[in-house]
Image (cartoon, rainbow, N blue to C red):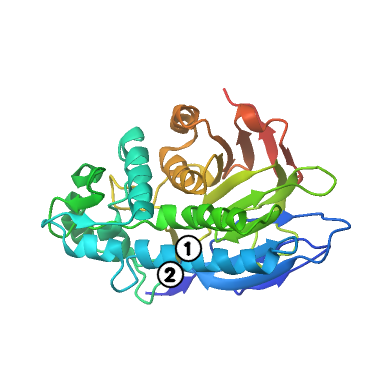
Amino acid sequence: MKMSTGKHSLKLHLVLLALLIAVVGFVIWLYTGYVGESTPYEVTNYAMGTYVQQTVYGKNGQAGASAAANAISSLENEISWRVDGSEIQKLNEQAGGDPVKVSKDTFSILQASLDVAEETGGAFDPTIYPLSSLWDFGGDNQQVPAREEIDAFLPYVNYQDLALNDAACTARLAKELEAVDLGAAGKGAACDAALQAYRDAGVVNAVIAVGGSIGVMGRRLTQENWRISVRDPDKSVDDSDAGMGVLELSEGFVSTSGVYEKYFEQDGILYHHLLDPSTGYPVENNLLSVSVVAQTGVLSDLLSTACFVLGLDNSLSVLEHYDAQAIFITRDKEVYITEGLKDRFTVSSQAYTLKELQ
């Protein structure tokens, strides 16, 4: 059995004060286009299982970036199942037992995750961990699990067994072996935490990229929107010309989920990390990637995963419910955008065709 992984090397390119991150799981980069302002403070570190790139402007730039890094680290220590003693790890260990007290931040992310799960009828499910741990995408043991293993764990993926108590700020999983994985929310939540840290530090203009999620605040000195280049999902992350379109964003968040973020090939078949909670296998549809613009980072992150699982047609009512916008890229190299992005997104690659939503 021959196995090959989809891991790529990291390259950072800073061109004309632009921010470009090329790393597994990161799908878009920003052209900040600042003119006439002092050199921004730029820093890259690793958190939430990915690279974090900050570009922060103004005299408080370094202080703001430091505060954002600390905020992200604190958040990771609360919500990552990988961190010993984290609140999510405690919740998973207590599955079937007593409720677990969590912080307001963790509760808020759990609530947002549960809300999206309910709105999508479980197409997105925060209790996906029993299945994702079987596949171990990006880990040392990634391989296609036996059908019997998947069938054995499917009953333990059920968002309806996650109970939240707002008054007590507690969470509880109903059955042993059930477990929460906030990987589909964490990077967007990190962007939320970072932008709040910037504001608290007096920063006005900044961009942050955490894996496939981006948060921007302020505008360019020309009062123009930030220009975000959306990645061609068919190109390598090492390709310096990997953009297929440009999204303009003033303040807000955009997250992308795609088949190329984490994957492996086994017996000539490519398996990507976006699992269908109803089958236990990677989603099979015509999508390569979904980018979602939303009011918060955590919501953009959650919805990008949810919409990928739902597929284009079934996503539209969900996006409308959350007043969110999206870019869908299909395997046929067709691009579909929601109404709110018609004046903010342009296709720049001749390989792709912009199509009207029916």
Q: Nearer the viewer, residue 157 or 102?
A: 102
Give amino acid for label 2.
Answer: Gly
Which quarter of the picture shows residue 44? Answer: bottom right
Q: Which mark is residue 262?
A: 1
Q: Residue at x 59, y 69 (%)?
A: 66
Q: Is residue 330 left or right of residue 301?
A: right
In this orientation, does residue 7 appear? Answer: no
Q: Residue at x 29, y 63 (%)?
A: 87
Percent coordinates x, y for residue 238 in the rendering: 67, 68
Q: Residue at x 80, y 63 (%)?
A: 17
- Extreme residue toward the bottom, this view: 140
Q: Residue at x 50, y 58 (%)?
A: 190
Disc 1/disc 2 C-alpha distance (Å) = 6 Å
- Extreme residue toward the right, this view: 36
Q: Quadrant of the C terminus?
A: top right
Percent coordinates x, y for residue 107 in the rendering: 32, 50
The relative height of residue 121 versus residue 33 in the rendered view (above or below) is: above
Which residue is identified by label 2? Answer: 138
Percent coordinates x, y for residue 320 in the rendering: 49, 27
The relative height of residue 7 versus residue 208 in the rendered view (above or below) is: below
In this orientation, does residue 161 appear? Answer: yes
Q: Is residue 312 left or right of residue 229?
A: left
Circle 1/circle 2 CB separation < 8 Å = yes
Label 2 secondary element = loop
Give amino acid for label 1.
Answer: Lys
Which quarter of the picture shows residue 78? Answer: bottom left
Percent coordinates x, y for residue 1 in the rendering: 37, 74
Q: Is residue 141 left or right of residue 51?
A: left
Label 2: few (<14), some (14–19) or many (≥20) C-alpha neighbours in 10 Å: some
Label 1: few (<14), some (14–19) or many (≥20) C-alpha neighbours in 10 Å: some
